[in-house]
Amino acid sequence: MSRLLVIGAAGQLGQCLKIAAERRGIADIVFPGEQEANILNVDALNGLLKAEQPAYVINCAAYTAVDRAEDDVQLAADVNATGAENLAKACRAVGATLIHISTDFVFKGDVVKLLNETDLADPINVYGKTKLDGEIAIANILDEHFTIRTSWLYSEYGNNFVKTMLKLGAERGELNVIADQVGTPTYAIDLANMIFDVVASGSKKFGIYHYSNEGVTSWYDFAKAIFEISGTKLKLNPIPGSAYPTRATRPPFSVMDKTKIKSTFGVDIPYWRESLEECIRQINRK
């Protein structure tokens, strides 16, 4: 496999890429530190890519604090849009293919249908808008790119919904969780393996792809599964999103159609609950 370079290596997906690479025996992969791989530092970024000469650059760096982004608009735009643009230009300069991670939050999510790659992107929060701006910037600069939109990412690493629920479940006897926002959880280890499958394929079918685990669920049902699998006993109450207002509006339905990525790369995608069981097993081993 050609040399790979991971941007945002310290984050949740970056850590999962490291684990997946070890399991798959991928040796020629570089995980630079945050300062060395700062996508807002053009000179350092260009220097890094010129020194490493990667065939593929995997961009996991993003501003992902969805609610905070509503007030921190400039930084979200800097990281998610300008940073993506900087990285696309740096990849173009060294002839690298960029694999960029985006989000289901580029969609409004007001229609109950599976969202495919050609559906209108119409974000309803700052995070989604800045991520869409990053997608557009990359597409305008670099032909050789794969943009992979994903959703509800979790793992045994970093901060995420699964780990938050396990922590709260250990501390409280009762929880309220939103039941009218629907999507699909994605185990970051599965996404990491999908990224390596894209690289291993050598495909030149560049563009936007959707990837999450299979199936559909609400945040309430996701939480219920977490507690069932982990053996956590508590009272769990389904509530409407209106009962738990957040700074940023979330898309109510953001289930993505994965036909394109499955047919292009010939992969089978695990069902979300099966992957959740594996994640909780890994958490319990730590």
Image (cartoon, grey):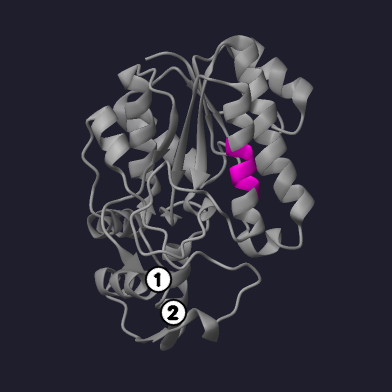
| Magenta segment includes 132 | yes
The picture places residue 14, in percent across and down from the top left corner, at 50, 39
Image: 63 above or below 231: above
Q: Looking at the image, which residue is at 60% across and 45% down? A: 131
Q: Looking at the image, which residue is at 70% across and 18% down? A: 46
SS assignment at label 2:
strand
Residue 99 is left or right of residue 265, and the answer is right
| Residue to which mark 1 is pinned | 219
Q: Quadrant of residue 244?
A: bottom right
The picture places residue 9, in percent across and down from the top left corner, at 55, 36
| Magenta segment includes 131 | yes
Q: Residues within 10 Å of mark 2 (few under 14, many from 20)?
A: many
| Residue to which mark 2 is pinned | 177
SS assignment at label 1:
helix
Question: Can I make out residue 261 in this image?
Answer: yes
Circles 2 and 1: CB atoms closer than 8 Å:
yes
The part of the chain drawn in magenta is: 130-135
Q: Gap in Å between the C-alphas at discs 2 and 1?
A: 7 Å
Q: Quadrant of residue 235?
A: bottom left
